[in-house]
Amino acid sequence: IDAASDGDTVLVSAGTYVENINFNGKNISVIGEDRETTIIDGNQNGSVVTFESGEDSTAVLSGLTIQNGNAQGDNPNNYGGGIYCYNSSPSLMNVTVSGNSASVQGGGIYCESNANPSLENVTITGNSSGTWGGGIACDYNSSPSLENVTISNNTAYIGGGISLWE
């Protein structure tokens, strides 16, 4: 990702990759071989995937499982265990978001400040949040688009599946 430029595609072979990635404002595609066999594991070390620099719909995350994120600590680090999306509108396709947690909001996915991601063929399951939105939490004028999205077995104090605010 660091060496990529807008419009580039990063192809990810099957395997488990223990890391956390940030698109850093780049409108690139990160495409895994198959979401069943291509896994990004956050190792309980913050959000697994971050979009926070105005990425648009040409920023694509596809064919991956996003797991084992743990968003804890000071704001905004306690939001979005699996995917943190701030003022960005990426395209998430053929993705599984599972086994992630956040101390405050969005165990699976957190959207804030006009974040309008597009989710297509996405499974969000087994995530948890200490307060709002175990699966997805949306705040401050954020409005994700969902098509063929399964949200199941997520937990939170308020809105185990989805929590929407403002």
Image (spheres, grey):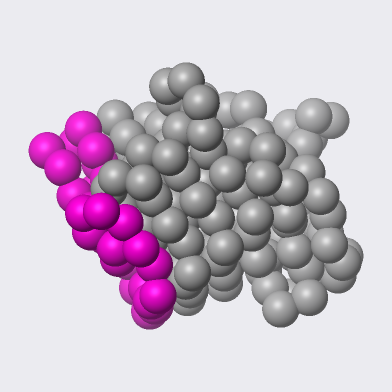
For the image, the number of numbered tags is 0
In the picture as drawn, the residue positioned furthest to the left comes out as: 166
Is residue 19 left or right of 152 when viewed as pictured? right
Q: Which residues are magenta?
A: 138-166
Q: Residue at x 37, y 30 (%)?
A: 87
Q: Position of residue 110 (x, y in %)?
A: 39, 44
Q: Quadrant of residue 98?
A: bottom right
Residue at 16% in and 42% down: 165
Residue 133 location (% of width, % of height) = 30, 53
Q: In the depicted view, which residue is nearer to us: 95 or 130?
A: 130
Q: Is residue 159 magenta?
A: yes
Picture layout, residue 41 above or below residue 165: below
* Horizontal side, residue 156 vs residue 15: left or right: left
Tell me the quarter of the image containing the N terminus: top right
Does residue 69 sit above or below 98 in this rendering? Answer: above
Residue 58 shown left or right of residue 40 in the figure: left
User: Can residue 70 be spotted in the picture?
Assistant: yes
User: For the point 46% across and 44% down, which residue is it?
Assistant: 102
Residue at screen point 58% across, 44% down: 70
Percent from the top left, x then y, of residue 94? 57, 72
Q: Is residue 4 above or below residue 93?
A: above
Is 71 within the magenta? Answer: no
In-image side of 158 versus 133 (left or right):
left
Image location (x, y in percent) of residue 16? 84, 62
Q: Compare residues 4 and 100 and report the one nearer the observer.
A: 100
Residue 128: image quadrant is bottom left
